[in-house]
Amino acid sequence: MKSSTPRNSPLYETFRVLGLGSNLASVQVLGGALASPNVSVRHLALQTLIHRGGQAEMSAILERIDNCNETELPFLANHVSSLIVPIEMGLGDRNPQKRQRSLCAIAKLQIASQFHHLVHAAQSPDDPQQIVAAELVLGLACKLGAEARRNKGKTSNANRERLLSDLWQSMLLFNDHRILQIVDAWLCASHWDDQAFKELFRPTRSNPVFKFVTRQLKHAHRAQFRELLAGVLWSQAPSPEAVQELGERTEQAMAVQLAEYFIKFGISPIVTKNLAMKIPIQCIEQLDFADNSVSLVHRCALVQLLAAADTSPDKIIFGITKLLETRDFTVDLACSNAIRSLRSLKPEIVVLVLSDCFDAPGMEPYDPPPWKSSLRTALERLIELYPHQAQAVQRSIEFIFSDFRCEELIKHLDDWPESHLMAYAKIVRIAEVGFVEFIERDAQSQSAVKRSRAIHAVRFLGMDNGLSDITIEAIQDKSEKVRIEAIYAITTGRNRNDAIEILLPLIRDEDQSVKTAANFALSSLRT
Amino acid sequence: MIDAFPVSFSAILRIEGYDRLIVKWWWVGLAIIALMVLLASWRLTVQVILWCNKPRSKPRGLLRQLVRVHRLSVKERALISRLAPLLPRGVPVAILFADPSSWAWNQIKEPTVLDSLEKLYAKIFGFPRDREGS
């Protein structure tokens, strides 16, 4: 703490005089100056009193401890040894104000060696300063706990450890004093990696106090408790019960806290390991990603956490699509990351979900699983949004569907029902950029079977993107089978009038089979 | 009796040759008394010195010292005396030199006095009145 007053200023000269000699009248003046609204005056007064160093001076500082601000307190904390005696005298004083000031000094200056006095006053219902002491303990616990929880790993802070130890002793006597603030203070000062916090959730601990503490953690809505529980995901070897407790929380504030920590600490192997416990985190799973009351930054963090948490793909895709619908470019990176985590989505599952067929010939009839319709809606929305996305998002979508190959589609032409093939082809159009070239190459093959199968595949891939020209050309193919496939492909095309125009000349074709197919196709197009 | 006592004293102490000592017993007594007087006077001297150096509250002395340091004229001292009664009860007058916010400006109405006070304020604190809160 440095005073802004120059050394040659008259005010500095005044304080030089006040710092001299044994005149106790100076102490009273300096004590008065400590209450000044002028920051420079307060700093000079504090420095002068510390420099004088007598007991009266220290008592004057204690009297004004409430006026000290955040820059003055660390300065005082460096000279705490001079204050111990007046603090101890104040604690034993019958004057309630002096006692209160001493308790206040212990909390404000974080004098670890005296914490037990503070905790003792807070746990004694008959103590006249109990309410003040309890508030001071809670405030101190919140401050030390918040500092500790700024780091994902546990850091050593002697003051916090001493306070936790004193509060723990008091908590063991909870049944005698029943002061809830002691429990709250202990939790507020805790870090998720504290051994005692981990022990709390062990079912083997039979002390009823532990059950009470966990109940308080569950039901009291304090930001510090949310921090403590959210941090469990970043904890080294947390107890499954603690993760379970986190998973059961449903409030939006908990989701926001998780998002905060995700932004701050990121996803580490520890988080992945903790998420692998497969405990659903309801506050994220139940979050409406379209809800603007949660900031977009937090929603982006949560969708990534959701993806990392091995949640069912429909929930992840719903979250992603809701974010993509905002059309805000800031969501692209988070969505890309979340989409890439869906790599494990198997093609068979996607086909099954997107297909309408449940009991085609050659298939065993089955009841669709309950998540089918939800995943189908999500996937269809993602496919729908695909063309309007930034390149990074498009590349991620292509990446997760990279197992969908045109070659595979052609392979399954005979053994899959049409509905499955339609579903598969829908994804091939996204995932395989060169699918038109692939069909073109096969359509020009020497093998009539290959040509025929390529044109057959066009039926599912659609008649656009240059496939139309290939199919129209195939009508003139030398193979009857290829020509018939081309007729069917054109029939399934989108533009009915164009199809009729192309097929009309074929009703006079020399080849009887082609003629029949063309007639059949035209009649179906006209109805 | 005086002569008889050393004999019996030597007998009590059973110190051989005591009666042959050159220094008689009363010399020893005299030396002890002298030492005690010396110690008492030393203690008295220390107490006097401590009493002289004992911290005391001398508000007037402090005020005089501050007036001297700031080289206040008689007129300026009179202005301080005018401000002093305006301070809250129990607050020392010397606070007027340490805390700019202690000056009760709102209770001074005369413009000439206000003008003089502003000059005095700037002299004591080294900055004009409008920078009071900084």
Image (cartoon, grey):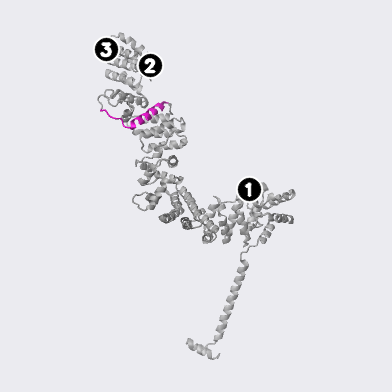
Q: Which residue is mark 1?
A: B133
The image quadrant of residue A334 is top left
Q: Disc 1 to disc 2, how far (Cα)?
A: 82 Å
Residue A494 located left or right of residue A510: right
User: Which subunit holds the residue at mark 1?
Assistant: B
The image quadrant of residue A385 is top left
Frontmost residue, A497 versus B1 = A497
Callout 2 environment at 10 Å: few (<14), some (14 to 19), or many (20+)?
Answer: few
Q: Is residue A366 above or below residue A522?
A: below
- Amino acid type of the residue that numbered disc 1 sits on in the rendered structure: Gly
Magenta: main secondary structure equals helix
Label placed on residue A495: 2
Label 3 element class: helix
The lab-note entry on whether marks 1 and 2 share a chain reads no
- Amino acid type of the residue that numbered disc 3 sits on in the rendered structure: Ser
Q: Is residue A5 above or below residue A294?
A: below
Query: Nearer the observer, disc 3 or disc 2?
Result: 2
Label placed on residue B59: none
Frontmost residue, A330 versus A434 = A330
Query: What is the span of residues highlighted in magenta in the rendered image?
Result: A364-387
